[in-house]
Amino acid sequence: MKKLSEKKKNLTNFLLISLLFILLLSFADLDNLRETMFKPEIIKDQFPKIITQAAKNTMIFTITGFAGGSILGLILALMKLSNFSFYKIISSIYIDVVRGLPAILILIFIAYGLPIAFGFRIPGDYSKGILALSIVSSAYIAEVIRSGIQAIPIGQREAGNALGMSRFTIYSKIILPQAFKIMIPPMTNEVVLLLKDTALISVIGVTATTKELTRFGRDGVMSDANATPLVVAGFIYLALTIPLTRLAGRLEKKLSSQDKKNI
């Protein structure tokens, strides 16, 4: 019954959205819209480069930024859970500052502030973007990891201590494998957010070979004097983010149903 009512609700929402979309189309100037935002010949010109270059670079920034953020986030989470007050304070300050600042300010500081303040240049075409995204994501990932670890009953740690296991063994063999299951849905959501944040990299400058989707679309708008390239970039973003969002939702439901069965 519950699944049936949920399907009816989804169908109703779909019909309402479809009706609203049809109403909007009936009032729109479709010829002008097609000419300025959906011009077929410009859409055709975007391929395959928007996939082989822009989408590829977007995924490179996303995957490497997430990897760097996960490593740093794990360290920060363990520091925050540490018995040493100094580690807790440092981790808390870092997380609060990074989460409290707009991502674009962090990117600008990494790209321009650090070289000016310390007199060095970050080498590599991808390095600035990857470093900035790693820092931005690390604070959020740290909180996901911390909450996942704290969700594991304390009795399991106590059992590990009773067996004479070291703190490292307890975390690596008992706590983290279980916490990982809890962390999968929010981590997947974090990947989606990070993928969208790659659009900010265009602000700090990219080379001809490191253009991501937003910069690729913006350059196309400037060269063609038409919004179509940016619209195409938007559809590519949707093609990447919607499956990940759906995956996160399914994983969350699956884990929730497993927890209910265990209870």
Image (tube, helix red, strand yellow):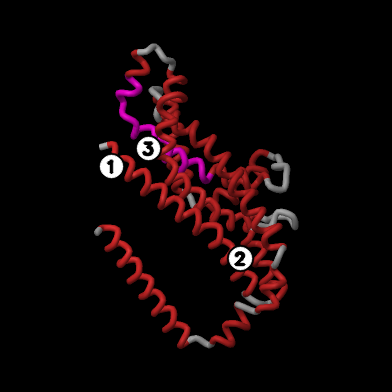
- Residue beneath disc 3: 147
Cβ atoms under marks 1 and 3 closer than 8 Å: no
Instruction: Residue 77: name its quadrant.
Output: top left
Q: Amino acid at mark 3?
A: Ser
Furthest toward the top, the residue is: 164
If you read the primary sequence from the N terminus, does the residue marked by circle 1 or circle 2 appear first?
2
Residue closer to the observer: 32 or 255: 255
Element assignment for label 2: helix
The CA span between labels 1 and 3 is: 20 Å
Residue closer to the observer: 215 or 195: 195
Name the image quarter holding the C terminus.
top left
Q: The magenta stretch spans which residues? A: 136-158
Please rate how many residues cluster around mark 3, counting C-alpha atoms within 10 Å: few if below 14, some from 14 to 19, many from 20: some
- Residue beneath disc 2: 233
- Residue beneath disc 1: 260
Is 144 inside the magenta-drawn segment?
yes
Can you tell which of label 1 and label 2 is closer to the viewer?
1
Q: Residue at x 60, y 77 (%)?
A: 37
